[in-house]
Amino acid sequence: MRKGFTFDAALCVSCKSCSAACILENGFQPGMRTLFAWNNHVLPLVGVINLSMACNHCAEPACATGCPALAYTTGPDGVVVHHSDRCMGCGYCTWRCPYEAPKINPALGFVEKCHLCADRTIQGVEPACVTACPTGALKMTKREEFDGALPAWFPDTGLRPSVILKNAENFNKPVIIPAENESIEEDAERLSRQGAGIDSSGILRKEWSLVLFSSMVIAASVMMIISALEKTRTGAIPFLLMPGAMAVSSVHLGVPGRSWRSVLHIRTSPLSREIVMALLLTMTALLRWLVPGLIPSLITVLISLTALISVDMVYFAADRSFRLRLHSGQAFFTAIYTTSWFIGQGTIFIILSMLAAISVVVRYRSADSDSLTRALYYTRAMALPVVFMLIYPGSPVTDIAALVIFITGMVADRLLFYCDFRPPGIRDTITENFGTVYEKERDKQCQDAGIS
């Protein structure tokens, strides 16, 4: 018998008593139980819906399968428990969970998550959030299977969340008095502000260590692939890059002292596989430097390519969108594209340049984002034709300029990869669904009023 939650949106008044009770009972940071608002500006065209959500204790929890440190366990009652004493604070579970349940505690460095007040439920007492709800909107439920219908905007139902939502499609519109004070145009402007884009500069500042780690792995892999293909000595640089990359990656951890746990879940965690492959790449680079010829060239190339794929899979497993898989800033494509430049394979370079150009065209919406993303996008787009114009004369000066522009474009594309990385989240699906319904209602009102 699995435990979960039943939530009735028609009864929730967003008093946040459930959130406060969760904090007081467990000593969690604020916001462990999140109150989402659909139409939180109370626009008159669509209904107002509140949603209280913590962990949905999924039957197939993405947080647990992705955790490299084995910090999650699932009990016989289906409750997914996070063990803070095992957590290294990588935050990968926060990417994987579409319900924003796990949250990094910045003061402590590790993740915190709802455990259904395990100490209380063992004694037959309901969770603190349930007992604190004054309207009965939130209740604990026991079922063999939570197979009830969920709203269309509810993300990743394939994880089989242990939650039942009632009246989440309630479209009773709020009455605004006086209604004349709020025009349709003002409504649209307010909605636009609500759904404003994400600050890419903030993303890159936050994830700088991951950007640098992956860039160093790409550089080391490219050097090793080139040396293997040209049958030359690798040298010390690839090996020196890899320990540096590992050291940089530890900066991302909230509890660096537990970084050794990162390799414990290689069976299902893409992050564990990435770390294992990075270690294998490091050893390969060391041996090729100290004992040239010990490791065959083919094995070197395969290890390097597998390491690059493992870097990409960390992100593909969190953001499963097709657009990210076609992104020319991914580690694997970046490496083989760069390799084709340095080994002088003109035909391969031209083909990869065409694929990069297609990727840029497909991502044209990046030009409508914030100023940093827009600048990176145009840098990537302009670098492609400029490189070909510079290499055509064939002079040493233009060749050097072409190399600089080529590398600049590749760096911009790699940064764009992180800007375009968007793990699915319930906050986004709520906003998107609200925007869609709002636009339909607004268009209908315009048609009824005879406005084109």
Image (cartoon, grey):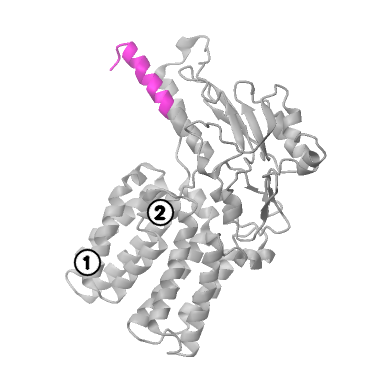
Q: Which residue is mark 1?
A: 390
Residue 9 x/y as whole percent: 60, 24
Q: Residue at x 41, y 63 (%)?
A: 331
Answer few, some or many: residues within 10 Å of disc 1's Cα (few below 14, many 20 plus, some between 14 and 19): some
Q: Is residue 253 left or right of residue 29?
A: left
Q: Is residue 436 above or below residue 144?
A: above
Count the marks.
Answer: 2
Q: Is residue 223 above or below residue 3?
A: below
Q: Residue at x 67, y 45 (%)?
A: 78
Kind of residue indicated by mark 1: Leu
Q: Nearer the viewer, residue 259 or 179?
A: 259
Q: Residue at x 76, y 29 (%)?
A: 131
Answer few, some or many: residues within 10 Å of disc 2's Cα (few below 14, many 20 plus, some between 14 and 19): many
Q: Is residue 224 visible?
A: no
- Whichever of labels 2 and 1 marks the residue nearer the N terminus, that label is 1
Q: Nearer the viewer, residue 376 or 365?
A: 365
Q: Is residue 58 above or below residue 440?
A: below
Kind of residue indicated by mark 2: Leu
Q: Residue 446 lies in magenta, yes or no? A: yes
The part of the chain drawn in magenta is 436-452
Q: Is residue 316 visible?
A: yes
Q: Which residue is mark 2?
A: 416
